[in-house]
Image: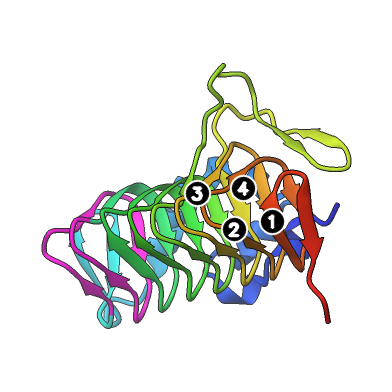
Amino acid sequence: MKITIADLLDLSHTLAGDYLRQFQYPWEALDGIKDLILSLGAKLPGEEYDQPQEHVWVHKSAVVAPTAYLGAPCIIGPGTEVRHCAFIRGSALVGANCVVGNSVELKNVILFDNVQTPHYNYVGDSILGYKSHMGAGSITSNVKSDKTLVVVKGETALATGRKKMGAILGDYVEIGCNSVLNPGTVIGRHSSVYPTSCVRGVVPENCIYKDQAHIVCREG
């Protein structure tokens, strides 16, 4: 299973690169996102970032709609657009040239550069890799219905030790509209998920997820 940080993510496309290099698996980094943002934010150049409130840093080139809520701590990177009624609950590291769309909610997440969450998405306790995209209405489900600890299920099962874990999207992943990524979902680089899918476990890189029984490798 290619589910390590090195397998999934190009760390040159996030301010969290040095932090993530400490870990083997991406979910191991989720507990420290809040402290990471506080540490990074304190070092950001004041001539490049505004600080509209304590522990909230917004790059001067970012566009934030007046109806968006930016909860502390968070960092909004250069060229990023935060649209009307976006709800950033806190502990959100949003990279450069991202889109956080209308009615999108973010909580305890790292969004790499050029990530798009444009319409009605919930992303919690998750990491979204470079140029990944979530279609309208697609969400991460970050708590199991029975409240037991999350297990990542691929060729083998890996216990995360976490009650809350959403999804890890590798670089260039495409998630179809109105899909649900269940707790512990990991999508490999350059893979895509059909609209209205209910995804569990690991989807390998360079694959198309049609349903749980039909995951096909891309040709060419």
Q: Are marks 1 and 2 in contact (CB under 8 Å)?
A: yes
Q: Are marks 3 and 4 in contact (CB under 8 Å)?
A: yes
Query: What's the residue type where badge 3 is placed?
Result: Ile
For the point 43% across and 56% down, the residue is 37
In depth, the one of 216 and 145 nearer the eye is 216
Local crowd size for mark 1, using a 10 Å CA cut-off: few (<14), some (14–19), many (≥20): many
Q: Position of residue 68 (x, y in %)?
A: 19, 58
Q: Are marks 2 and 3 in contact (CB under 8 Å)?
A: no
Query: What's the residue type where badge 2 is placed?
Result: Tyr
Which residues are the magenta region? 62-85
- Disc 4 marks which residue? 29
Which mark is first along the chain, 2 or 1?
2
* Residue 209 badge: 1
- Disc 2 marks which residue? 194
Query: What's the residue type where badge 1 is placed?
Result: Tyr
Distance from label 2 to label 4 (Cα)? Answer: 28 Å
Local crowd size for mark 4, using a 10 Å CA cut-off: few (<14), some (14–19), many (≥20): many
- Our reading of the magenta stretch's main secondary structure is loop
* Residue 33 badge: 3
Determine the image quadrant of residue 49.
bottom left
- Determine whether the residue tagged by mark 1 lies in a helix, strand or loop: strand
Distance from label 4 to label 1 (Cα)? Answer: 26 Å
Distance from label 1 to label 2 (Cα)? Answer: 6 Å
For the point 72% across and 51% down, the residue is 23
Tell me if residue 204 can be seen.
no
Q: Is residue 5 magenta?
A: no
Q: Are marks 4 and 1 in contact (CB under 8 Å)?
A: no
Query: What's the residue type where badge 4 is placed?
Result: Ala
